[in-house]
Amino acid sequence: LTRPSRWGTPDAETDSKSAFDLCRFITAAETIMLPASVALCALAILLLPAGAASHRAASPSALGELSVVSHRPAASTWRRTQCGSPSGDADIPTRWASEVSADTTPLPAYPRPQMVRGRGGDRDKGDPSLWSNLNGLWEWEPAADAAPPFGRPLNGSILVPFPVESCLSGVAPASSATLVAQMWYRLVFDAAVADGAKTLLHFGAVDWQATVYLNGLLLRHDGRLGNHTGGYDGFGFDVTDRLKHAGNELLVHVLDPSDAGAQPNGKQRVSAVDRPGGDTYTPSSGIWQTVWMEAVPPSYISTLKIDQASTTNVKVTAFVEGGGATTPVRFEVVDRDGTTVAEAAGAAGSEVSIFVARATAWSPSEPYLYDLKVSTPTDAVTSYFGLRTFALGDGPKGRRPLLNGNFTFLAGFLDQSWWPDGQYTAPTDEALAFDVEAVATFGLNMIRLHQKVNPERWYWHADRLGVVVFQDMVQKYGRASKATVPLFVSDAAAMVHGRRNHPSILQWTAFNEGDCWEVFDTPPHDVAGGGALFK
């Protein structure tokens, strides 16, 4: 029998199901005499937590699992700058810019709607007892070098997560010559975490190279101390052993050479600050997606891999940290009505195929999403998927795209996904959704997201609204060199890994600029090898 858990599963309903399943197993076993089986059955039911027999969910801890209080610069230190070329008079914020201030948390929505931990599965709020949003005013200053300024306040402030060059950051440069390539961020906070819990620190994206310190110690990411390279993918740290109850000092050093570097930087151009125009734009340096902390159990579900390229089956792999390869995992598929339509079980790290009877396929005309509840003995997350296939078929006039086996004409926007006030970062979640919602108002059904990887919530909006996404790999747009190749390969793998579970993404565009793919001329990193990498 399982025990009730503050992590959201097994809850009372799960416990009762386990008990009654055990009863059926005991009474069916030929090796146990009937009196003994009845006694064991009664014991199983008596051991259920209160309310389990009536399938009432157990209540989460009233105290919560994670509480964070940040000590920020005064709100009066922030002021929106002119949203437009500093050399002109234009000020062109979007209508959402007025909702952004230093007095409230920017972009407060739950940043990982594809994997919501805890009870409820609320994709907008998450479980408030298990996560904390660190967005807001941070200390900030340009960096002369990479020597950490431990223990001292920085000289300015910035509104996170808006890029340095955006007018919502409050520190946008007045000219290309004053653009900052190296910088420091600093946040001091207190943290209370439940006994036995682990604490994770997440960064949605930082452009381009981030080095992170907590309480004077360099943090470790993917085996590398503190250093994350890549401007478009999320990364994080287990900070459990480095966290204090009060006075935690978080320092982030960022290096971003923008278009002067070898890395894929998309349509960013330093000279655009002085000379806007054309098809390249003002850079978006530094932290540009949500920073947040999360409480997890000692053994927790870290990631999911969802293969939904079918109209009948979904294949799921759950990866578990701290539990070992034998950790049992349970999967439950729930339809829009809240009815469980399929269940399966497996082990951590192993792919499980789940058949969905009488399944409804995902498409622009009916963006049907199934909830996917994944649980282990200590943890539970809620995800989702949409069953769909995408292929090419022979039509009367040549090859045509087939969505779920039907010829489908896909038409939509080439979306650069830049905001006049936030640059790479939408001012609000409503603004983030607006570009996706606009597609249908024009009678279209598709977006090609051009040379940018958006926050996960953008893809959630595409998933729920039924907008097909052709996802570009971010290019080195001009000045590509051999030094670009390994950085491109690393970024491409990170992009696919981070966004592959979204049913709206039907196609990956590996190369789309000739001056980038021309440097890919040596196998395995030639153009053909680039396509194979995505597959």
Image: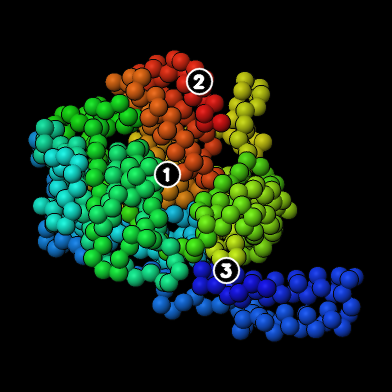
Q: Quadrant of the N terminus?
A: bottom right
Q: Position of residue 34 (x, y in %)?
A: 89, 80
The numbered mark at residue 464 is: none
Q: Amino acid at mark 2?
A: Pro
Crowding near the residue tagged with mark 1, few <14, some 14–19, many ≥20 C-alpha atoms within 10 Å: few
- Looking at the rendered structure, the secondary structure element under dot 3 is loop
Q: Amino acid at mark 3?
A: Thr
Q: CA distance from mark 1 to mark 3?
A: 28 Å
Q: Which residue is mark 1?
A: 222
- Which residue is pictured at 46% across the width and 60% down the height? 123
Crowding near the residue tagged with mark 2, few <14, some 14–19, many ≥20 C-alpha atoms within 10 Å: few
The numbered mark at residue 524 is: 2
Q: Note whether 119 is above or below 239 in the view shown.
A: below
Q: Which residue is mark 3?
A: 9
Q: CA distance from mark 2 to mark 1?
A: 24 Å
| Numbered marks: total | 3
Q: Position of residue 511 (x, y in %)?
A: 44, 25
Disc nearest the viewer among 1 and 3: 1
1 and 3 marks in contact (CB < 8 Å):
no
Disc nearest the viewer among 2 and 1: 1
- Which residue is pictured at 43% across the width and 72% down the height? 195
Q: Amino acid at mark 1?
A: Asp
Q: Note whether 138 is above or below 481 in the view shown.
A: below
2 and 1 marks in contact (CB < 8 Å):
no
In front of the other: 253 or 70: 253
